[in-house]
Structures are given as C-alpha cells and as structure tokens.
Amino acid sequence: MAQSAKATDLAVAPASPSTVAEDLVTQLSERGVDVVFLNPGTDTAPIQEAVAKLRATGVDVPRIVLCPHEAVALAAAHAYFAVTGRPQVVMVHVDVGTQNLGAMLHNAFRGEAAVVIIAGRTPITAYGELPGGRDHVVHWQQDVPDQAGVVRSYTKCVADLERPETVARQLNRAFQLAGSTPPGPVYLTASRELLMSGRPKSVGRLASDRYGVPAPMAPDPVALREAARVLAYSRRPVIVTARVGRNPAAVAELVDLAELVGAVVIDRRERVNFPSTHPAYLSDPDASRAALASADAVVVVDSLVPWVPLLGVPADEAAIITMDTDPVRSSVPGWSFPSDVTLQTDPASGLRLLCAELRAREAAQPSALWEERREYVRVLADQPRTSTEPEADGMPVTSAVAVRALDSVLSDDDLLIEEATTNAEALRQGLRRTLPATLFHPGGSGLGWGLGGALGAKLAAPERRVVAVVGDGSFLFASPSAALWAARAAKAPFLTVVFQNGGYAASRRPVFDLYPDGYSAAANDVVGTRFDDPPDFARLARACGAAGETVAEPAGLVPALERGLAAVAAGSCAVVVLPVRSPWLTQPEAAWSS
C-alpha cells in the first residue's frame, strides 16, 4: 500500500527526462515504437527505472513485453514489423543475451526485418568513478573483446552509444538505417554509466521525422523498355517470386502483369504474393518444374533463391529478367543466378511501370501472340484441381489431409505464421491464401521462429486471429514454454498447429539424397533424426496455461482445430497437435524445394 501511495504522489505533471535512460525511452515513443520486447539483465536496470518513473509522472512509454528467452523477443519484433511496417525494439543483456538471439537474428537479416536491438555493455568503470560501474562477478565474465562481432555479419550497422550528447542522433540514424531498403536489424550497445548519466540540457536534437527513409526507387527507363520488349515477344513467360507481397500493394501489380502477358506464377510463398485460387498460380511442383524448363522468358521478382539448380532450371536460351531492390544480393557470397535484364527497383513501382510499358507496346503492335498467351492461362483454369489423396483411415494422417482440415477452419483474413519446414509444400498446395498480408514466413532458415512470430503478430494486430503452423522440430526450437508464457502474460492469445511427423525430416532427406546406396538407405533410417519418444506437446501447453490436445483420429481433426480457435477467442493460447506421416521419415524422396 505504501508503494502505491508513493506512486500516486509522484503522478503529477509530466517531468522532463533527466537521465539518458529516460531520454532514450521517450525517444522510442517519438519514433513510433509501440513495444519493447525485453529480456532483462544487470545492465537494463536504468531502463527499467526510467520506464517506472516516466509512467508514474504521466509520460507515454512503449509497452514492455517480458520475453523469458531472447529468441522469442526477436521473433516477435520481426513479425510485428512484418505486420505493421514499423520497426520495434528488442533489449537484451550484454554478450550472453546477444548470443541467445542466435538463429532469429539470421531470420531477421535474411527476412529483411527492420528491428533495433539495444544490448547492454559491460560497465566501463570498476572503482566507483561513475554511477553504474561494475559491482558483480558477471561484469568481468561478460567483458569480451568484440561483443558486436557476434552479430556483425547479420546486421546493417553496429554502434555503441558512447556519449550523452550523441544518443539522440545515433538513435535517429539507427531507425533510419533499419527501415531503409532493404530493411534489416541494427545493433546498438549502451553501458550503465551512460544510461545513468544526466541528459545534457544544452544539446538540442532534431525531430525523428528529419531522418526519413528514402522513397521507393524506380527502374532505369532503358532497362524497363528492354524488359517489356523481351516479354512482348515471349511465348511462354513465367514469373517467379517469394515475397513481393511484403508490400500488399505489389500483389495487385503482380496479378496485372501475369494477366497482361499470360504468364504462370511459381511462388515460394513467404508472403501472399499471388492469390492461390488464380488460374495462373502453379501449385503443383511437377507443373512448376515443367513451366520453368519450357519458359523462354522468366521474370524473377523479389526472390532470394528463384530456383534450386539441381532440382530444375530455365533453359539456357531463356531470357531472365530480375526485379528487386537488391538484385545482385551482395550479402550472399555464393549467389550466382543469371540475369539478362536487371531492374533495381521497388517491386510495386517496377511492376506498375512495366505493365504500363507493355500496354503501350500492345496498343502500338497488336499481335495474336498476346491473346495466345492469355488463352494458355485460361486453359489452365479449366483444368480440374481435384485431390487424389485418399481419405484417412487412421492416425497419423498425410500432410495433405491435415492441411485440408486446417483450410476448412481458417478465415481469409486470419494471420497465418508459417514455419512448417518439410510440410511447407503441402501447405502451399492445399492452403488457400488470397488476401495480401495474411501469411508470414521468417524469410530465413533458423528454426524456432513460429511461436515468437505469432506473439508479435497478435500484438501488432490484436483484433485479428493469429494461427502459427509449425513442425514438431520447429516447436521444440521455439522455446515453447517461454513463448506461451509470454503470450499469456501479454494477453496475446494465438493458436499453434503442430504437424508432428516424429523427427527432423529436413535433416534426414540429405542423407538419402547424397548416399542413395548407402547404409542409411539400406536400413531406411538416419542416425539422430527421429523423436522416438517425443514430449507431450499438449501437456506442455496446458502447463503454460494454454489449451492443448493431440488429435487421436482423422474425424477429430476439424473439431480439435475448432476447439483450439474457440479457446483463443476466449483469451487463451491453444496448441493442437496433428500427427502426420512424412515420406522423408519413411523412404528416400526428392522434393521441389527445401
């Protein structure tokens, strides 16, 4: 009671920030930061005190969401940015907290997610020279020669906040860099001595809107005309994309291009890039391979890996048109895909201008070829798309059966967080997604993103229903107890659907591929890839305050998913485990994509 009374007494007129920590927190609000995803340590004390003081004195501060594991925090911030387009902040503890960001930092970097990471730094002083100096054994244990070296290859910039006079400009610069195309993580460090020091009264600061990000870039007109010429005379154009739908406005432009030139679309679907119900959308892997092989022109739009050469490539004589903000992928040393016409541009702008150029050509040079290509796509639309998958007669079911059940309970505007790994192809073929900005993939290969991503998506869009679809390996990587607890504490419920195939199928397949006549193939088993006695995921969920169940029979698939969604509607997280069969865990099998 005494503490409450004291807080009430302090809650008078808002006070001006008096320390660097207070100034930093207020500046985050000014930059549109809604949430700070926090995993605290001895170095975050000045920030925690600053938040308490500012709240008590009536100052608006970002929401603090406690994440019991740093990877959950970064996955959540990544997804928050994916949903809103606004960079958020992750705060972690010196070198050890930085290391725990791990694979989620890889995902944020490869997925081009704008996140500002603020890490503590070992105190500089040890003999009482300044407030905040070393006062614990860990302050020597955590003193390393190059803390930023842990993240240097996965960030756009690293910097230390060294002086009170420069903090505001450094923060402005950090958010500007994080949000500029291509977006990505920025890493800052700050010592306790700095955060506890007084805010300089004599140093003014420019408003954050004076540090804007560059406007979207337009393509070179000469290259644009050449791209239009190539497409105007092509007979079998193909479009390849992975994440052009990060900008929802680009989806309609991509549909316009496909319909205009009569192109089919191969979509790796890290976002909703193209409506999956559109006749030009190729969902079958064999059809995708055949279309790519027979194409005489291929337009690659916003795709880090347009094809895997060993699995299927365009013919040597096919013209390749690349459209991307970073078409040469300078951050990938081994990237070596050909490009005959390279358009460095914002995809939405580039697609719109390319369509305008093509329309002008068609009007000036009408030809039966335009209608021939469009008729080709219309014929595809007339082909029946019926599943040959037999009805399930027991558990585990095939992935296709599980996907059909999931598809039947999802709404078009549900936000889907996808980390299904070896079941991703079944989702791409069977799960309808038609509305832009309703599907999100990490964009990298670091497992464990799904649950933290669902937390971030729900915080970003509290009025929307959020569903995470993960494999059992991904679920274990995701620190599920930390993620589910954080979601419960933040009142951000979501449904997690676990495709439980009993092991690491993605790690099993390469052994069969590389050693088709080896001992593993003969035994039809691969060392270290099976979960012979897996944890009870449903019970783990219940231990974290979530609803949880494992489906025991095929007829129970839809009712279980509906119960999970009902639990979410009532304010609780839910985990529904769907035991599925995986060909990679039963026999060697190749695939269109990993």
Image (tube, rainbow, N blue to C red):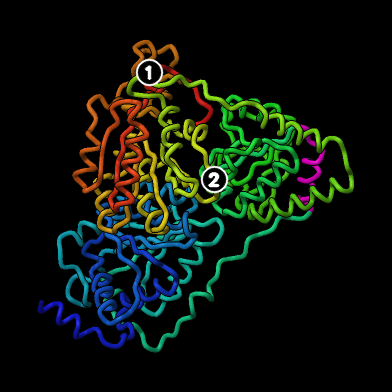
Which element is circle 1 on? Answer: loop
Residue that appears at 43% across and 21% down = 391
Contact? badges 2 and 1 (CB < 8 Å): no
Range of the magenta residues? 222-235
Q: Residue 418 falls in which quadrant of the image?
A: top left
Magenta span: predominant SS is helix
Instruction: Name the residue that disc number 1 marks.
Output: 586
Which element is circle 2 on? Answer: loop
**Quarter of the picture holding the N terminus:** bottom left
Residue that appears at 35% across and 76% down = 60
Residue that appears at 32% across and 34% down = 472
Percent position of residue 278, x then y: 62, 39
Relative to 44, is 230 above or below?
above
Percent position of residue 430, x then y: 50, 32
Residue 372 within the magenta-colored segment of the rendering:
no
**Callout in the foreground (2, 1):** 2
Residue 223 within the magenta-colored segment of the rendering:
yes
Percent position of residue 279, x then y: 65, 35
Where residue 502 is drawn, which disc sits there? none
Q: Residue 169 falls in which quadrant of the image?
A: bottom left
Instruction: Name the residue that disc number 2 marks.
Output: 272
Query: Hey, which residue is sitting farthest left in the picture?
Result: 2
Instruction: Between residue 260 and residue 517, name the one nearer to us.
Output: 260
